[in-house]
Image: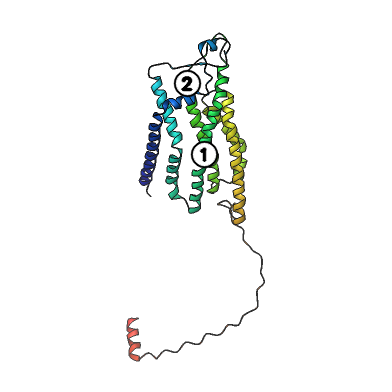
Amino acid sequence: MALADHLRELRNRLVKSVLAIVLFTIVAAFFHKQLMNFLLAPLPNCSFADAATKEHGTCAVSATIGLLTPFTLTLKVCLTAGVVAAVPVWLYQLWCFVAPGLHRHERRYSLGFLAAGTPLFLAGATFAYLILPTTARMLVSFTPTEVTPIMPAEDYLDIATRMVVVFGLAFEFPLLLVMLNFGGVLSGKRLRGWWRGMVMGITVFAAFATPSADPLSMLALAAPIWALYFLAVGIALLNDRRRARRNPDAGLSDEEASHLDLSIEEVGAAEAVEATPSPIASAPVPAARHEQMDDIT
Protein backbone atom coordinates (compact mmCIF):
# COMPACT_ATOMS: atom_id res chain seq x y z
CA MET A 1 0.00 0.00 0.00
CA ALA A 2 1.12 3.52 -0.71
CA LEU A 3 1.54 6.08 2.07
CA ALA A 4 -1.74 7.78 1.16
CA ASP A 5 -3.55 4.43 1.40
CA HIS A 6 -2.06 3.83 4.85
CA LEU A 7 -3.20 7.27 5.96
CA ARG A 8 -6.72 6.63 4.66
CA GLU A 9 -6.77 3.29 6.46
CA LEU A 10 -5.63 4.98 9.67
CA ARG A 11 -8.32 7.62 9.25
CA ASN A 12 -11.01 4.99 8.80
CA ARG A 13 -9.88 3.10 11.91
CA LEU A 14 -9.79 6.29 13.95
CA VAL A 15 -13.26 7.28 12.76
CA LYS A 16 -14.68 3.89 13.75
CA SER A 17 -13.02 4.12 17.17
CA VAL A 18 -14.30 7.64 17.75
CA LEU A 19 -17.80 6.66 16.66
CA ALA A 20 -17.78 3.77 19.12
CA ILE A 21 -16.64 6.08 21.93
CA VAL A 22 -19.32 8.62 21.01
CA LEU A 23 -21.99 5.91 20.94
CA PHE A 24 -21.05 4.61 24.39
CA THR A 25 -20.82 8.19 25.65
CA ILE A 26 -24.41 8.83 24.52
CA VAL A 27 -25.54 5.65 26.26
CA ALA A 28 -23.70 6.70 29.44
CA ALA A 29 -25.44 10.09 29.32
CA PHE A 30 -28.71 8.39 30.20
CA PHE A 31 -27.10 7.12 33.41
CA HIS A 32 -24.99 10.18 34.22
CA LYS A 33 -26.37 10.59 37.73
CA GLN A 34 -25.65 6.98 38.62
CA LEU A 35 -22.14 7.29 37.19
CA MET A 36 -21.40 10.49 39.09
CA ASN A 37 -22.70 8.99 42.34
CA PHE A 38 -20.56 5.93 41.67
CA LEU A 39 -17.43 8.04 41.27
CA LEU A 40 -18.30 10.24 44.25
CA ALA A 41 -18.88 7.24 46.51
CA PRO A 42 -15.19 6.89 47.57
CA LEU A 43 -15.13 10.57 48.62
CA PRO A 44 -15.37 10.91 52.44
CA ASN A 45 -18.34 13.28 52.38
CA CYS A 46 -19.84 14.93 55.47
CA SER A 47 -21.91 17.92 56.51
CA PHE A 48 -20.61 21.35 57.55
CA ALA A 49 -21.19 20.49 61.21
CA ASP A 50 -19.20 17.25 61.01
CA ALA A 51 -16.41 18.82 58.98
CA ALA A 52 -16.01 21.65 61.49
CA THR A 53 -16.17 19.57 64.69
CA LYS A 54 -15.52 15.96 65.52
CA GLU A 55 -14.97 14.74 61.95
CA HIS A 56 -12.48 17.48 61.06
CA GLY A 57 -9.62 16.18 58.96
CA THR A 58 -11.34 12.90 58.00
CA CYS A 59 -14.07 14.10 55.62
CA ALA A 60 -14.92 17.05 53.40
CA VAL A 61 -17.99 18.89 52.15
CA SER A 62 -18.45 18.36 48.42
CA ALA A 63 -19.91 21.23 46.41
CA THR A 64 -20.15 22.52 42.86
CA ILE A 65 -19.09 26.04 41.95
CA GLY A 66 -20.43 27.77 38.84
CA LEU A 67 -23.51 27.54 36.68
CA LEU A 68 -22.01 25.38 33.92
CA THR A 69 -20.04 23.09 36.25
CA PRO A 70 -22.69 20.33 36.51
CA PHE A 71 -22.97 20.20 32.70
CA THR A 72 -19.19 20.00 32.14
CA LEU A 73 -18.90 17.35 34.86
CA THR A 74 -21.57 15.29 33.15
CA LEU A 75 -19.73 15.50 29.81
CA LYS A 76 -16.42 14.53 31.40
CA VAL A 77 -17.83 11.56 33.29
CA CYS A 78 -19.82 10.29 30.30
CA LEU A 79 -16.81 10.63 27.98
CA THR A 80 -14.62 8.69 30.40
CA ALA A 81 -17.27 5.99 30.61
CA GLY A 82 -17.41 5.89 26.80
CA VAL A 83 -13.63 5.43 26.52
CA VAL A 84 -13.64 2.62 29.09
CA ALA A 85 -16.67 0.86 27.59
CA ALA A 86 -15.28 1.07 24.04
CA VAL A 87 -11.94 -0.55 24.93
CA PRO A 88 -12.60 -3.75 22.92
CA VAL A 89 -13.60 -1.68 19.88
CA TRP A 90 -10.59 0.64 19.64
CA LEU A 91 -8.19 -2.19 20.52
CA TYR A 92 -9.72 -4.24 17.71
CA GLN A 93 -9.38 -1.32 15.29
CA LEU A 94 -5.73 -0.98 16.30
CA TRP A 95 -5.21 -4.66 15.58
CA CYS A 96 -6.97 -4.39 12.19
CA PHE A 97 -4.64 -1.55 11.21
CA VAL A 98 -1.50 -3.49 12.16
CA ALA A 99 -2.55 -7.02 11.11
CA PRO A 100 -2.08 -6.69 7.30
CA GLY A 101 1.64 -6.09 7.80
CA LEU A 102 2.18 -9.13 10.02
CA HIS A 103 2.98 -12.75 9.32
CA ARG A 104 0.52 -15.51 10.18
CA HIS A 105 2.13 -16.37 13.54
CA GLU A 106 2.41 -12.66 14.39
CA ARG A 107 -1.33 -12.25 13.74
CA ARG A 108 -1.95 -15.02 16.26
CA TYR A 109 0.10 -13.09 18.83
CA SER A 110 -1.81 -9.89 18.06
CA LEU A 111 -5.08 -11.72 18.75
CA GLY A 112 -3.63 -12.59 22.14
CA PHE A 113 -2.85 -8.91 22.60
CA LEU A 114 -6.48 -8.08 21.88
CA ALA A 115 -7.71 -10.77 24.29
CA ALA A 116 -5.41 -9.65 27.12
CA GLY A 117 -5.53 -5.90 26.47
CA THR A 118 -9.16 -5.42 27.46
CA PRO A 119 -8.91 -7.16 30.88
CA LEU A 120 -5.67 -5.31 31.65
CA PHE A 121 -7.20 -1.92 30.87
CA LEU A 122 -10.26 -2.70 32.97
CA ALA A 123 -8.03 -3.99 35.77
CA GLY A 124 -6.10 -0.72 35.78
CA ALA A 125 -9.32 1.30 35.86
CA THR A 126 -10.68 -0.84 38.70
CA PHE A 127 -7.45 -0.51 40.65
CA ALA A 128 -7.59 3.27 40.30
CA TYR A 129 -11.14 3.31 41.65
CA LEU A 130 -10.18 1.11 44.61
CA ILE A 131 -7.39 3.41 45.77
CA LEU A 132 -9.49 6.56 45.43
CA PRO A 133 -10.86 6.40 49.02
CA THR A 134 -7.39 6.13 50.55
CA THR A 135 -6.09 8.93 48.35
CA ALA A 136 -9.02 11.21 49.19
CA ARG A 137 -8.78 10.61 52.96
CA MET A 138 -5.05 11.23 52.99
CA LEU A 139 -5.40 14.50 51.05
CA VAL A 140 -8.24 15.69 53.29
CA SER A 141 -6.19 14.92 56.40
CA PHE A 142 -3.84 17.81 55.54
CA THR A 143 -6.64 20.35 56.17
CA PRO A 144 -5.63 22.90 58.86
CA THR A 145 -7.56 22.87 62.11
CA GLU A 146 -9.15 26.30 61.63
CA VAL A 147 -10.31 25.58 58.08
CA THR A 148 -13.51 23.77 57.03
CA PRO A 149 -12.67 21.36 54.18
CA ILE A 150 -14.86 22.06 51.15
CA MET A 151 -13.97 19.99 48.11
CA PRO A 152 -15.26 21.13 44.70
CA ALA A 153 -16.81 18.16 42.94
CA GLU A 154 -15.17 19.12 39.65
CA ASP A 155 -11.68 18.82 41.18
CA TYR A 156 -12.39 15.40 42.64
CA LEU A 157 -14.05 14.06 39.51
CA ASP A 158 -11.20 15.40 37.39
CA ILE A 159 -8.73 13.43 39.51
CA ALA A 160 -10.96 10.34 39.46
CA THR A 161 -11.48 10.28 35.68
CA ARG A 162 -7.82 10.95 34.92
CA MET A 163 -6.69 8.21 37.29
CA VAL A 164 -9.07 5.71 35.70
CA VAL A 165 -7.78 6.42 32.17
CA VAL A 166 -4.10 6.72 33.14
CA PHE A 167 -4.09 3.54 35.21
CA GLY A 168 -5.85 1.66 32.41
CA LEU A 169 -3.33 2.76 29.77
CA ALA A 170 -0.36 2.16 32.07
CA PHE A 171 -1.39 -1.44 32.58
CA GLU A 172 -1.04 -1.97 28.81
CA PHE A 173 2.70 -1.18 28.81
CA PRO A 174 3.97 -4.63 29.95
CA LEU A 175 1.72 -6.28 27.39
CA LEU A 176 3.34 -4.15 24.68
CA LEU A 177 6.78 -5.40 25.78
CA VAL A 178 5.59 -9.00 25.56
CA MET A 179 4.26 -8.42 22.06
CA LEU A 180 7.56 -6.89 20.96
CA ASN A 181 9.35 -9.97 22.28
CA PHE A 182 6.99 -12.38 20.51
CA GLY A 183 7.50 -10.38 17.33
CA GLY A 184 11.28 -10.76 17.60
CA VAL A 185 11.99 -7.06 18.22
CA LEU A 186 13.16 -7.31 21.84
CA SER A 187 14.79 -10.25 23.60
CA GLY A 188 14.11 -11.27 27.17
CA LYS A 189 17.78 -10.83 28.02
CA ARG A 190 17.70 -7.23 26.87
CA LEU A 191 14.50 -6.53 28.81
CA ARG A 192 16.08 -8.04 31.91
CA GLY A 193 19.13 -5.82 31.48
CA TRP A 194 16.92 -2.73 31.37
CA TRP A 195 15.26 -3.37 34.74
CA ARG A 196 16.98 -0.48 36.58
CA GLY A 197 16.09 2.07 33.92
CA MET A 198 12.58 0.64 33.62
CA VAL A 199 11.94 0.89 37.35
CA MET A 200 13.17 4.47 37.37
CA GLY A 201 11.23 5.37 34.23
CA ILE A 202 8.01 3.83 35.58
CA THR A 203 8.45 5.76 38.83
CA VAL A 204 8.97 9.05 37.01
CA PHE A 205 5.99 8.33 34.77
CA ALA A 206 3.81 7.59 37.79
CA ALA A 207 4.92 10.83 39.43
CA PHE A 208 3.87 12.90 36.40
CA ALA A 209 0.83 10.82 35.40
CA THR A 210 -0.81 10.78 38.82
CA PRO A 211 -3.10 13.82 39.09
CA SER A 212 -2.61 14.20 42.84
CA ALA A 213 0.82 15.07 44.19
CA ASP A 214 0.77 12.56 47.06
CA PRO A 215 3.35 9.76 47.07
CA LEU A 216 0.72 7.16 47.90
CA SER A 217 -1.02 7.51 44.54
CA MET A 218 2.34 7.51 42.76
CA LEU A 219 3.42 4.26 44.43
CA ALA A 220 -0.03 2.77 43.92
CA LEU A 221 0.41 3.30 40.17
CA ALA A 222 4.09 2.37 39.98
CA ALA A 223 4.01 -0.84 42.08
CA PRO A 224 1.57 -2.80 39.86
CA ILE A 225 3.44 -1.73 36.72
CA TRP A 226 6.70 -2.89 38.31
CA ALA A 227 5.14 -6.28 38.99
CA LEU A 228 3.69 -6.50 35.48
CA TYR A 229 7.04 -5.49 33.98
CA PHE A 230 8.92 -8.29 35.75
CA LEU A 231 6.15 -10.69 34.78
CA ALA A 232 6.62 -9.57 31.16
CA VAL A 233 10.38 -10.18 31.47
CA GLY A 234 9.72 -13.70 32.75
CA ILE A 235 7.36 -14.46 29.87
CA ALA A 236 9.90 -13.06 27.39
CA LEU A 237 12.69 -15.25 28.81
CA LEU A 238 10.51 -18.35 28.62
CA ASN A 239 9.58 -17.50 25.04
CA ASP A 240 13.25 -17.04 24.10
CA ARG A 241 14.09 -20.40 25.65
CA ARG A 242 11.28 -22.07 23.71
CA ARG A 243 12.43 -20.36 20.52
CA ALA A 244 16.05 -21.47 21.09
CA ARG A 245 14.99 -25.12 21.38
CA ARG A 246 13.27 -24.95 18.01
CA ASN A 247 15.93 -22.84 16.27
CA PRO A 248 19.45 -22.62 17.76
CA ASP A 249 20.18 -19.56 15.60
CA ALA A 250 17.12 -17.60 16.80
CA GLY A 251 19.13 -15.55 19.30
CA LEU A 252 21.76 -14.35 16.82
CA SER A 253 21.93 -10.71 15.83
CA ASP A 254 21.72 -9.55 12.23
CA GLU A 255 25.52 -9.09 12.05
CA GLU A 256 26.38 -12.46 13.65
CA ALA A 257 26.97 -15.54 11.50
CA SER A 258 25.17 -18.76 12.29
CA HIS A 259 27.05 -21.87 13.44
CA LEU A 260 28.38 -24.15 10.68
CA ASP A 261 29.01 -27.85 11.20
CA LEU A 262 32.58 -28.33 9.94
CA SER A 263 33.11 -31.86 11.30
CA ILE A 264 34.63 -34.38 8.85
CA GLU A 265 32.49 -37.35 7.94
CA GLU A 266 33.78 -40.66 6.60
CA VAL A 267 33.42 -41.15 2.87
CA GLY A 268 31.72 -44.40 1.83
CA ALA A 269 32.93 -46.93 -0.69
CA ALA A 270 32.72 -46.18 -4.40
CA GLU A 271 29.66 -47.37 -6.25
CA ALA A 272 29.70 -48.86 -9.74
CA VAL A 273 27.88 -46.83 -12.33
CA GLU A 274 26.81 -48.26 -15.68
CA ALA A 275 28.19 -46.48 -18.69
CA THR A 276 25.83 -44.50 -20.83
CA PRO A 277 25.43 -46.00 -24.29
CA SER A 278 27.04 -44.04 -27.12
CA PRO A 279 24.67 -41.88 -29.15
CA ILE A 280 23.58 -43.04 -32.56
CA ALA A 281 25.61 -41.41 -35.35
CA SER A 282 23.61 -39.02 -37.47
CA ALA A 283 23.35 -39.31 -41.24
CA PRO A 284 26.10 -37.62 -43.26
CA VAL A 285 25.50 -34.06 -44.34
CA PRO A 286 25.07 -33.64 -48.14
CA ALA A 287 27.69 -31.63 -50.06
CA ALA A 288 25.09 -29.05 -51.10
CA ARG A 289 24.27 -28.48 -47.43
CA HIS A 290 27.97 -27.90 -46.66
CA GLU A 291 28.11 -25.18 -49.34
CA GLN A 292 25.04 -23.41 -47.86
CA MET A 293 26.60 -23.48 -44.39
CA ASP A 294 29.82 -21.99 -45.74
CA ASP A 295 27.88 -19.19 -47.37
CA ILE A 296 26.08 -18.37 -44.10
CA THR A 297 29.26 -18.27 -42.07
Residue bearing the label numbered 1: 119
Q: How many numbered marks, from 0 up?
A: 2
Residue bearing the label numbered 2: 155
Residue 56 appears in which quarter of the rendering? top right
- Report x, y in % for residue 138: 58, 20
Q: Is residue 153 visible?
A: yes
Camera-side residue of 272 and 10: 10
- Report x, y in % for residue 91: 45, 41
Q: Is residue 194 visible?
A: no
Check the picture and name the quadrant holding the C terminus. bottom left
Q: Is residue 115 above or below residue 32?
A: below
Amino acid at circle 1 = Pro
Tell me if mark 2 has few (under 14), some (14-19) or many (20+) residues whose alpha carbon lies within 10 angstroms of its own.
few
Q: Sequence order check: which comes first, mark 2 or mark 1?
A: 1
Which element type, helix, strand or loop, lies under badge 2?
A: helix
Residue 29 appears in which quarter of the rendering? top left
Inter-mark Cα distance, 2 to 1? 28 Å
**Residue at x-position 43% and y-position 40%:** 89
Proximity of marks 2 and 1: CB atoms separated by less than 8 Å: no
Amino acid at circle 2 = Asp
Which element type, helix, strand or loop, lies under badge 1?
A: helix
Camera-side residue of 62 and 212: 62
Residue 190 appears in which quarter of the rendering? top right
Instruction: Single out the residue that lies furthest toward the top.
Output: 146
Tell me if mark 1 has few (under 14), some (14-19) or many (20+) residues whose alpha carbon lies within 10 angstroms of its own.
some
- Report x, y in % for residue 196: 62, 36
Give residue 270's mark. Answer: none
